[in-house]
Image (spheres, rainbow, N blue to C red):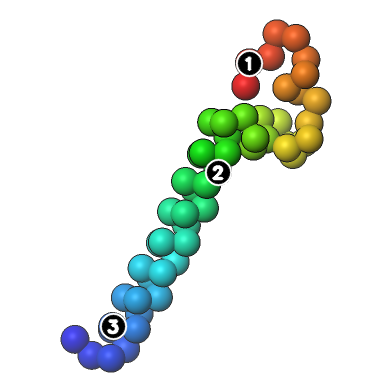
Amino acid sequence: MTTSTIIQTIVVLGIVAVALVYVLRRVIKTSRGHGDCGCGCGKDCQCKNKPGKKY
């Protein structure tokens, strides 16, 4: 393996690691009820307070 191949592999693995951490953080926040509900209003939306809505 050449030096450029090793550097490219390290960069790709770094990007994948950052993406994995981001996704896991979002899943954990959403499952605990601290993330947004997906309506597009953000984490302070009023959808969670409406009766009949399950998020």
- Could you tell me which residue is drawn at 70 percent across and 31 percent down? 39
Q: Quadrant of residue 45?
A: top right
Residue position for label 1: 54
Query: Alpha-carbon neighbours of circle 3 within 10 Å: few (<14), some, or many (≥20)?
Result: few
Q: Quadrant of residue 1?
A: bottom left
Q: CA distance from mark 1 to mark 2?
A: 18 Å
In the image, residue 22 sits, relative to residue 55, either above or below, namely below
Query: Alpha-carbon neighbours of circle 2 within 10 Å: few (<14), some, or many (≥20)?
Result: some
Give how far across and how far down residue 48 sits, in percent.
73, 22
Give how far across and how far down residue 41 sits, in percent.
77, 36
Element under disc 2 = helix
Counting labels gives 3
Left or right: residue 4 compared with residue 23:
left
Tell me which numbered mark, 3 or 1, is placed earlier along the sequence.
Answer: 3
Q: CA distance from mark 3 to mark 1?
A: 47 Å
Left or right: residue 21 compared with residue 9:
right
The numbered dot on residue 46 is none
Residue position for label 2: 26
Q: CA distance from mark 2 to mark 3?
A: 30 Å
Left or right: residue 27 compared with residue 6:
right
Tell me which numbered mark, 1 or 2, is placed earlier along the sequence.
Answer: 2
Assign the C terminus to one quadrant of the image. top right
Residue position for label 3: 6
Residues 31 and 3: in front is: 31
The three-letter code of the residue at mark 1 reads: Lys
